[in-house]
Amino acid sequence: MPRTSVQTGRRQSLIDAAILTIGEQGSLDVSVREIATRAGMSTALAFHYFGGKDGIIIETMRHLLREFAQEVRAGLDCATTPRERLAAIVRASFAASQFERTTIAAWLVFYLHAYSSPPAARLLQVYTRRLRSNLVDALLPLMDRADALLTAEGLAAMIDGSYVRHALRPQGPDAGEAIASCMDYLENRLARGGAQ
């Protein structure tokens, strides 16, 4: 196996281990050693690839954001109308790659980390801007700009809020329920705004 493939595989194993470890503990109070052990490699190798825990955390956030972006692109590629585009964005927000108990918990921890980590804050700002931009772009053919901005902000808040609510559910997250709630909000906003 080529060396780059081995390195890529090891880095991915560490990222997967970080998601599981942080998600299960619900905290960043985990060590590089715990993450490396879960990935089946040495702590030294984890430091070699990421330079420390903050490097692992930032790369894990980047990984989750790339997965989300891929889900959005795949959904938008199949959408032909503004409503289909909106539904695709909502569905991508609750895709299995993102909306699973440990991944949800990891996301919540990353949000908190953004308060003290400028790189984490920048990543979350990129996510926020892209989500808003995609939503507004899909909404503009259906309502005026002021309503589109307000609706995009409300829908983004519902998406993020669903992560908090579903992370705390004893029975676990329910993507179908989260999607239905967001789509119901969206349909109400479209009806109120006199959508074309």
Image (cartoon, rainbow, N blue to C red):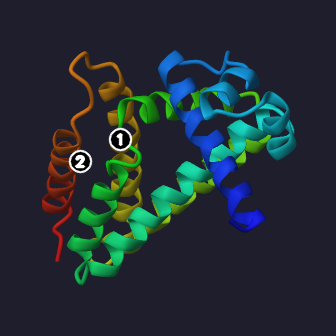
Residue 147 falls in image quadrant:
bottom left
**Would residue 8 appear left or right of 174 to someone viewing this image?**
right
User: Label 1 amino acid?
Assistant: Phe
Q: Is residue 136 left or right of residue 69?
A: left
Residue positioned 41% across, 50% down in the render: 153
Is disc 1 placed on a helix, strand or loop?
loop
Q: Which residue is mark 1?
A: 99
Q: Which numbered disc flags the more N-terminal residue, 2 or 1?
A: 1
Check whether the beta carbons of the residues at disc 2 and disc 1 lie within 8 A of each other: no
Q: Position of residue 35 (x, y in %)?
A: 66, 28
Please tell me whether residue 13 is drawn above or below residue 173 in the rendered image.
below
Q: Which secondary structure lies at badge 2? A: helix
Q: Residue furthest front?
A: 1
Report which quarter residue 121 is drawn in: top right
* Residue at 35% across, 41% down: 99
Separation of marks 2 and 1 at Cα, in angstroms? 14 Å
Pick the residue in front: 28 or 32.
32
| Mark 2 nearby-residue class (10 Å; few <14, some 14–19, many ≥20) | many
In the rendered view of the protein, which quadrant contains the N terminus?
Answer: bottom right
Read off the residue under disc 2. 182
Q: Amino acid at mark 2?
A: Cys
* Residue 157 higher or lower than 110, as above or below: below
Crowd tier of the residue under label 1, counting other residues whose Cα lies within 10 Å: few below 14, some 14–19, many 20 or above: many
Q: Quadrant of the C terminus?
A: bottom left
Residue 97, percent across and down? 40, 49
Q: How many marks?
A: 2
